[in-house]
Every structure is written in structure tokens, then in C-alpha cells.
């Protein structure tokens, strides 16, 4: 296998899918040597079967808005690979959603889920529907219309969706409710469910907390204490706000939060009162960060700006969306003394930015390792649903910490270079790949 040839072929067969090509290129560059040391992989053309999703569903979602107007969106589910467990991956509702983005996310999810040590394959789905500005009833009608098309492809042992951008507990509740009505069974066919109908304690916290646990593991390799460290966080949704909370609990200073409108800067770190307000504003009131200075005039608001060039920080935790941190941002972070980047979002750093981080030999954790706590806890939710039991928050948190430590150890095992530097990108990709590849080999050509 030659990475350049595989990529050229994928670009020819699937043009205009830049995010998908970007994600595949990053993984193939890491695994090329390992792949080529196993000629049996190539004899079975494993690489193409691993890059191209098992199947993709795409469909029109028609729904009626509050004024009685009929609206149409596109819906998709990419079932990428179920070699090691049922398809598993979130659903994203955002106006930017297209097949390139969902194919990249499903591809990444396959390796991420493999890293968690749990039995989950990779998938992703979504729609170009934006929940912003919609009433609860409009969102319910949309979720029902979406699931009316998709429910036949889902199931606790078949394909188990969860939330992602634009899909939180409310949307999962509406989708699961309609799934249950159509399938006429109450099973763990979704994760991220409400606590009263099979959800897991700690699932909302898991991605952000898990990223902090991964960061602690990385810092420990260099004997660095997180207390007092200055951290730039982007995003202000599920992942970012729980990252903010855990960082503050650990004694770090959170300098920034952002949404699609702009960035809030707290030069000396957010106070507990400010952090609590931002949490409420974004997660409960569904407001905009531009409203924050009305309440706290001492905080700066920078419209249309991302955090990376606004502050000097020790640590960056991009937690909003893909490609939100480019080479100029990476250089500014490095010039400002940043020594660790731990990704809450999926592929938030561009390929050029990643290159700068690894060249500078800073601690850099790609999303597929650092944000895997979310899907890992979804796996724990599936286990609880199967047992018809609910574990305590302490039990789930304990398991989450262990899983993040395990993922970190796998990255070190496969990513440590002779000079001692840990290349977490390489480590995560090789560890994730090996398990999936071995399972695919054992199961024959499917
Ligand atoms: P949310 O919808 O809860 O929050 C997303 C945040 O990012 C919001 O603040 C949103 O701003 C901002 N944002 C979204 N798109 C853009 C954009 N194009 N430009 C700038 N800002 C943007 O999503 P999550 O927190 O769940 O997800 C965030 C990231 O983490 C995604 O990459 C997701 O794939 C990844 N992830 C999520 C997991 C989970 O458990 N939820 C698990 C693993 C990864 P606004 O409020 O203005 O819309």
C-alpha cells in the first residue's frame, strides 16, 4: 500500500469531500509502515475496505414548521465499520452538514471506538437542519421525521446513535421516543438518553471530563501540575462547558470560551460565577456569548474571532468543530508558550497545524484519543441498558478515568519514538487500526 496512491484513488472516486480526504490521509500516513509489514493485509485489500464505509443512507426529511410551511432537509447515516461491534456514533444537526463531514466523522469514529477497549464499530449521521431558533415543537417534528426514515437501520445490536453538534438530551429524547414507537421495543438503541429512560449518569460530562483526564495523563509524562495553568478553550456547547468545569475544579485558569458568533476572554481566568453563568446561558437558556458582557462587563467579547490569537496560554483545548485551528493559530499558540493541545472536538486542527505541533514536540492529543471519553461512556450506557441496571456517578467516573488512562497507555505504546517523544497521532492511529484490522482479517471478505 502506498498512501499517495490510495488517496489519489479515493479523491478520484469521491471528489469534493475534503474533510473525508483529510481524515483518511492523517490515518494512512501513520499506519503505512505497520500495514506494509503485514503483506496479508494487502492481499485482502484491507485498506480500501477500511477507508470506504460499509454503507450510507441518505434521505429527504420533510417536516412542517410552526407557520404551517413544509420544510425539507437532507438526512444521512454513514455506517462505516462494524468489525468489532455494532455501529456506534453520534448524530449532528448543523447547517454545514454534508456527506464529506459525516464520512470523515464515521471514519474517525471507527478508530476512536476501537481505542476505547469496548466493543463498538464506527458510524455517524446527521442533517443540514439547524435547531437554532426553532421552537421545541418544530424540533420534535423534525426529529420524528428524521427517525421515521432511519429507524429500520437502528437497534441496540445493530446501530446505536448518540448526540453531537446540535443534538443534546432534548433531541435524543425526541428521536429515541419515535424510534421506540416505530420499533415497538424499549432497548438501548440510543445513548445520551435522559436519566428517567435508560441514560447513564456522567454521560453529559464524559467528553469534556474525559479530555481533562487525558490531558492529566499527558502532563504527568513531563511531571507538570495542571494547577494554575492558563487554558484556552473553544466552543461553548456540551464538550466545552464540561471541559471548563473540570479544568476549574482542577485549579486551572480558563481564559476563553467561544461560540459561532465570537470569543469571550477572561485575562485572569473565569470566576466560578462567570463560568456558572456561561454554562446556564449556553446549555439551558440557549443564548449567545455576545450576551455575556451585559452581565459581566469586565469580560471581553471579540465578535467573529477564535480564541487562539487573543491570549497567551499554556494549554489549548479546541472543543467546537473541525478545522477551527489553522497553521497561523498554531504558530501563535507556540509563540505564546503553549506546550499542550488536547482536542475535545473532532479534527479541530488543520493538517498544517498538527504538523507544527508535532514538529515543535509539544504534547498534542488528537480528538480520536482525547475526546473518546464520550463514546466510551456511551458504551457504558449500553452495558447498563443490557443489564437493566444503573451505575452510580462514582462508578462511571471511575471507569471513565481508567479508560482514558488506558487510551493514553496505548498511544504511548505505539507512538513513543526513540528519543522518548510520544507522537500521540501515530500512537492512536496504530492502536485503533490494529484491533479493527485483525477483526476484519478474521471475518473474511464482507
Ligand atoms: P454542541 O452543539 O453542544 O456545541 C458546539 C459548540 O461549537 C457551540 O458552542 C457552537 O456554537 C460551536 N460551533 C459549532 N459549529 C461551529 C462553527 N462552524 N464555527 C464556530 N463554532 C461552532 O456540540 P458538542 O459540544 O457536542 O460538540 C463539539 C465538538 O466535539 C464536535 O466536534 C463534536 O463532534 C465533538 N465531540 C462531541 C462529543 C459529545 O459527546 N457531544 C463526543 C466526541 C466529540 P453555537 O452555540 O453558536 O452554535
Image (spheres, rainbow, N blue to C red):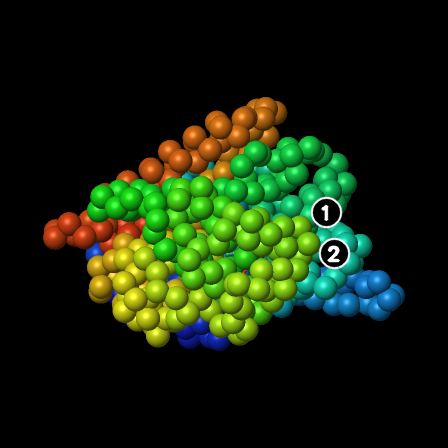
Q: Assess disc 1: are there few (<14), some (14-19) or many (≥20) residues with their C-alpha within 10 Å of its C-alpha.
A: many
Q: Residue at x 56, y 43 (%)?
A: 204
Residue 38 visible to the viewer: no
**In the image, residue 355 above or below residue 206:** below
- Find the distance from the CA under tag 2 to the CA under tag 1: 8 Å
Which residue lies most toward the front here? 298
Q: Name the N-terminal-most of marks 2 and 1.
A: 2
**In the image, residue 180 above or below residue 66:** above
Q: Residue 148's x, y, as percent?
A: 74, 52
Q: SS at mark 2?
A: helix
Left-right relation of 129 to 445: right
Q: Residue 115's x, y, as percent?
A: 37, 43
Callout 2 touching callout 1 (CB < 8 Å): yes
Quadrant (top left/top right/bottom left/bottom right) for the N terminus: bottom left
Q: Assess disc 2: are there few (<14), some (14-19) or many (≥20) residues with their C-alpha within 10 Å of its C-alpha.
A: many
Q: Residue at x 12, y 51 (%)?
A: 418
Q: Which residue is mark 2?
A: 139
Q: Nearer the viewer, residue 268 or 61?
A: 268
Q: SS at mark 1?
A: helix
Q: Residue 210's x, y, as percent?
A: 43, 43
Q: Nearer the viewer, residue 443 or 94?
A: 94
Q: Residue at x 56, y 49 (%)?
A: 273
Q: Quadrant of residue 259?
A: bottom right
Which numbered disc covers residue 174?
1
Q: Nearer the viewer, residue 259 or 165?
A: 259
Q: Residue 19's x, y, as percent?
A: 45, 68
Which numbered disc covers residue 255?
none
Quarter of image, ligand 1: bottom right
Residue 295 visible to the viewer: yes
Which residue lies most toward the left here? 419
Does ligand 1 reach within 8 Å of label 1's beta carbon? no
Q: Residue at x 59, y 37 (%)?
A: 156
Amino acid at each position: 500500500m502506498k498512501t499517495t496512491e490510495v488517496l489519489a484513488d479515493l479523491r478520484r472516486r469521491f471528489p469534493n469531500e475534503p474533510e473525508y480526504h483529510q481524515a483518511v490521509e492523517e490515518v494512512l500516513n501513520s499506519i503505512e509502515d505497520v500495514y506494509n509489514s503485514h503483506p496479508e493485509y494487502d492481499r485482502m485489500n484491507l485498506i480500501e475496505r477500511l477507508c470506504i464505509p460499509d454503507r450510507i443512507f441518505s434521505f429527504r426529511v420533510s417536516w412542517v414548521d410552526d407557520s404551517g410551511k413544509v420544510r425539507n432537509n437532507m438526512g444521512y447515516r454513514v455506517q462505516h465499520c462494524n468489525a468489532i461491534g455494532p455501529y456506534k456514533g453520534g448524530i449532528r444537526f448543523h447547517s454545514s452538514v454534508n456527506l464529506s463531514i459525516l464520512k470523515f466523522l464515521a471514519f474517525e469514529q471507527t478508530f476512536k471506538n476501537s481505542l476505547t477497549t469496548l466493543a463498538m464499530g464506527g458510524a455517524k449521521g446527521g442533517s443540514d437542519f439547524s435547531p437554532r431558533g426553532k421552537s421545541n415543537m418544530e424540533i420534535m417534528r423534525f426529529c420524528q421525521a428524521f427517525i421515521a426514515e432511519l429507524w429500520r437501520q437502528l437497534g441496540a445490536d445493530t446501530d446505536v446513535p448518540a448526540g453531537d453538534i446540535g443534538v443534546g438530551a432534548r433531541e435524543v429524547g425526541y428521536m429515541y421516543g419515535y424510534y421506540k414507537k416505530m420499533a415497538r421495543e424499549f432497548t438501548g438503541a440510543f445513548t445520551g438518553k435522559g436519566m428517567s429512560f435508560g441514560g447513564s449518569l456522567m454521560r453529559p460530562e464524559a467528553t469534556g471530563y474525559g479530555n481533562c483526564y487525558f490531558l492529566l495523563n499527558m502532563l504527568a509524562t513531563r511531571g507538570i501540575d495542571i494547577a494554575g495553568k492558563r487554558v484556552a478553550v473553544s466552543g461553548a456547547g456540551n464538550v466545552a462547558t464540561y471541559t471548563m468545569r473540570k479544568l476549574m475544579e482542577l485549579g486551572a485558569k480558563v481564559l476563553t470560551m467561544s461560540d459561532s458568533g465570537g470569543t469571550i476572554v477572561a485575562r485572569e481566568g473565569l470566576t466560578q460565577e462567570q463560568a456558572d453563568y456561561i454554562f446556564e446561558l449556553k446549555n439551558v437558556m440557549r443564548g449567545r456569548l455576545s450576551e455575556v458582557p451585559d452581565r459581566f462587563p469586565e469580560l471581553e467579547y471579540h465578535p467573529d474571532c477564535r480564541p487562539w490569537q487573543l491570549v497567551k496560554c499554556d494549554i489549548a483545548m479546541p472543543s467546537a468543530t473541525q478545522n477551527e485551528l489553522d497553521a497561523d493559530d498554531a504558530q501563535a499558540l507556540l509563540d505564546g508558550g503553549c506546550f499542550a493541545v488536547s482536542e475535545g472536538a473532532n479534527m479541530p486542527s488543520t493538517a498544517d497545524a498538527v504538523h507544527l505541533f508535532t514538529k515543535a514536540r509539544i504534547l498534542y492529543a488528537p480528538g480520536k484519543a482525547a475526546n473518546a471519553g464520550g463514546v466510551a461512556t456511551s458504551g457504558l450506557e449500553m452495558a447498563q441498558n443490557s443489564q437493566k441496571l444503573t451505575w452510580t456517578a462514582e462508578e462511571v467516573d471511575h471507569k471513565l478515568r481508567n479508560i482514558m488512562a488506558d487510551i493514553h497507555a496505548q498511544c504511548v505504546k505505539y507512538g513513543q519514538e526513540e528519543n522518548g517523544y510520544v507522537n500521540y497521532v501515530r500512537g492512536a492511529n496504530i492502536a485503533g487500526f490494529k484491533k479493527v484490522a485483525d477483526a476484519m482479517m478474521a471475518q473474511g471478505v464482507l
